[in-house]
Each structure stands twice: as C-alpha cells, then as structure tokens.
Image (cartoon, rainbow, N blue to C red):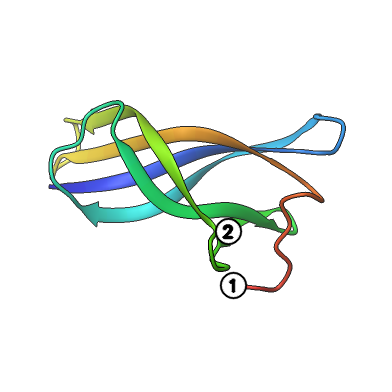
Amino acid sequence: MRYQFCQYVTIVDMNEEILSEVLFEHGVFESNALSIGSSVVIYQLGLKQFDVVYDKREGKTVRSKVVDIEINLITQPTETRVYIEPVRLIVGQHDIGEVE
C-alpha cells in the first residue's frame, strides 16, 4: 500500500518561543499495512537556516511512532497519510549548516 508520510515540526528559538510550525512531508512510500503505534526509522530532521531538512550525517537516524493515519475518501484515487510523532527543533542547536 502507498502511504504519504508527514510530520509536524515546531521551530523555536533558545527561549522556547515558537517561530513557526510546518508540516514536513517525508514522501510517498510503499509499505505493508501500518497501524497507530508502529515505528518507522527515518533520517533525523535538522535546520538549514529556517528550512526543515534531513540531517543525513552518519548516525543521524531516529525511530518515530505513527500517531495518526488519515484516509481521504474524497480524492480519487484515495490518499492515505501517515503522521509520525511531532518534533521540536531549536534554532542554533539543530542547525546542520551546509552538510547534506
């Protein structure tokens, strides 16, 4: 089955003030049936200025839980979105610079 994987990301400053909230789309993947509570292994997220990007440096993977599965019956073909647990990134601490 095809799933669109998404993750809410809150970007905050060093004082925990929210600067922005974005929905990061990991992409569409083929997978067996998923359920809430399942775990997925993905690249850790980081910041390049204020853009959310993958931190593909060695050892920067993270295991995240599926928190919601949304099936949109209005669209044709039917879309299935999988939401993984949200993350909070701190400007200055989660910057990855120019490394990809």
Depth check, mark 1 against mark 2: the one in front is 1
Q: Is residue 5 left or right of residue 48?
A: left
SS state under label 2: strand
- Local packing at callout 2 (Cα closer than 10 Å; few below 14, some 14-19, many 20+) is some
Q: Position of residue 60 (x, y in %)?
A: 55, 58
The amino acid type, in three-letter code, at marker 2 is Val
Nearer to the camera, 73 or 38: 38
Q: Position of residue 83 (x, y in %)?
A: 38, 35
- Local packing at callout 1 (Cα closer than 10 Å; few below 14, some 14-19, many 20+) is few
Q: Residue at x 22, y 32 (%)?
A: 72
Q: Is residue 93 left or right of residue 70?
A: right
Q: Is residue 51 left or right of residue 45?
A: right
SS state under label 1: loop
Q: Position of residue 97 (x, y in %)?
A: 74, 67
Residue denoted by label 1? 100
Real-space CA distance between mark 1 and mark 2, rounded to the nearest whole angstrom: 9 Å
Q: Which residue is drawn at 53% across and 61% down?
A: 59
Q: Earlier in the sequence, mark 1 or mark 2?
A: 2
Residue 90 sits in which quadrant? top right
The C terminus lies in which quarter of the figure? bottom right
Which residue is situated farthest in the front direction here? 59
Residue denoted by label 2? 53
Contact, mark 1 vs mark 2 (Cβ under 8 Å)? yes
Nearer to the camera, 17 or 97: 97
Q: Residue at x 16, y 30 (%)?
A: 73
Q: Residue at x 70, y 73 (%)?
A: 98
The amino acid type, in three-letter code, at marker 1 is Glu
Which mark is on residue 44?
A: none
